[in-house]
Amino acid sequence: MTQPDALLDREARSSINCVEHPQLNFFRFSGHRLSAYVKLDLTRALCRVEQMSTQGTKSEHIQAVEHAAQNPLILGLFLPLQSGAWSPSTAPRGTSWTFDYNARCTVLAEKLGFDLVFGLAQWMGKGGYGGKMKFRESSTDPLIVTAGLAALTKRIILISTVHILYGWHPLHLAKFGATIDNMSGGRWGLNVVTGYKKSEFEMFGLKPQEHDFRYEMAEEFTTILKRLWLEDDELTIDGRFWKTKNAFISPKPVNGRCILVNAASSAAGLAYAVRHSDFIFITSPAGADPVKACDALPPHNSKIKAAAKEQGRTIRTIINPHVICRDTEKEAWAQYQAILDHQDPVAADNFHATFAGGDQSSWKQATRDQWVVGGNVHLVGTPEQIVDWFIRLKRAGCDGVQVNFYDFIPDLEYFGCKVVPLMHQAGLRVASKTQAA
């Protein structure tokens, strides 16, 4: 028996607990041997997908990813698809959740040379997180938004978040993703999230699943998804959680498969990420203070990249700074304080409590006031100071930043005018021949 087969045989002998759920077509197998062989088949399938990746197929050579990675620091924009964006504050601003506003943000970001835009997905009840502002009650769906943005852009990567355990079948996303990828010329990416909020699972008539078990489900989902993208034959699988018979999609994604992304901090999430993701959205293990973040990030980044290297893969880590930049440091900190002074206390309490109380590992060190401002790391200061922080984040092992703002369009315009040129001077960005005029 070869070493891989021996490993798979050991996997097959492990006991497997399956789950029933009518919404997701979960299947319970009464005999352990039957369950084991189903898992064995999926494990071998995953090995075939990974072998295709390491043998130089198009799946690991996605042009848009390679283009973005030419920059020493990848530059992304966190789109404000939810009302209130990241900040439960009523300080004056024009930020809007509407498609038109987000389209303006995206077109401007592409013009400024940004590499990617990203949309968060959220399922909220009436009133959102509450308060007078009904924080995040209104939101658009990032999968639909990125489809619309595909027709408005030429170069920038478009990443959609999807809660894959909320009733999806891999065939749905394989088809929808390949469609948007072709619409965009190979620029679409999927941010895979499993969800953790009890209220969201219950919206779909589902029972919440234990944290690590969700990643077992994600592993199977993504394996089927990648096979549908990469293989030319019809696919038949009896899985622990999903099954399909003679499934096939055409056209395939432009580069063999679509860009894959996830955000993770836990052991289970990081293990998933290094097997599948091109980008991983990381969070500071030390909260939003950039000094503490830059001290804590080097071992965190090193651990992720070492784990990816063991898989024969390269993964790029991207962190989310909230940038507040003005001509003087005093003006920048005055804006920071204004956001805090105008906070909606009810919305802020609920927003902070949701993340502080979940079973996810990310964001745990952020304080309530840091949640009011929003974003994972707070960078406040002059254009020169912001670039200095970017340099420090790069030295801490981050491959990119995905910025958000409070008043998005004017702040983005200012960032493009004042900060981006300094990033080029600092060697963080390279000129793009394909950059939109």
Image (tube, rainbow, N blue to C red):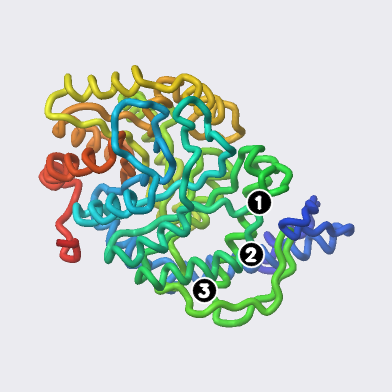
Q: Nearer the viewer, residue 90 or 372?
A: 90
Disc 1 to disc 2, how far (Cα)?
A: 20 Å
Disc 2 to disc 3, how far (Cα)?
A: 22 Å
Q: Which mark is residue 427?
A: none
Q: Earlier in the sequence, mark 2 or mark 3?
A: 2
Q: Which mark is residue 216?
A: 1
* 171 displayed left or right of 139: right
Task: Name the kind of residue labelled 2 in the image.
Answer: Pro
Task: Name the kind of residue labelled 1 in the image.
Answer: Glu
Residue occupying the point 45% across, 65% down: 258
- Residue 216's place in the image compared with 90, above or below, is below
Q: Nearer the viewer, residue 300 or 101?
A: 101
Quarter of the figure that contains the N terminus: bottom right
Q: Label 3 neighbourhood size at 10 Å, few (<14), some (14-19), many (20+)?
A: many
Q: Which mark is residue 230?
A: 3
- Of tags 2 and 3, which is closer to the observer? 3
- Residue 338's place in the image compared with 79, above or below, is above
The answer to whether any part of residue 112 appears in the image is: yes
Residue found at the far right of this picture: 30
Q: Earlier in the sequence, mark 1 or mark 2?
A: 2
- Of tags 1 and 2, which is closer to the observer? 1
The answer to whether any part of residue 312 appears in the image is: no
Residue occupying the point 63% across, 52% down: 165
Q: Quadrant of residue 11?
A: bottom right
Disc 3 to disc 1, how far (Cα)?
A: 21 Å
Task: Name the kind of residue labelled 3 in the image.
Answer: Leu
* 358 displayed left or right of 252: right
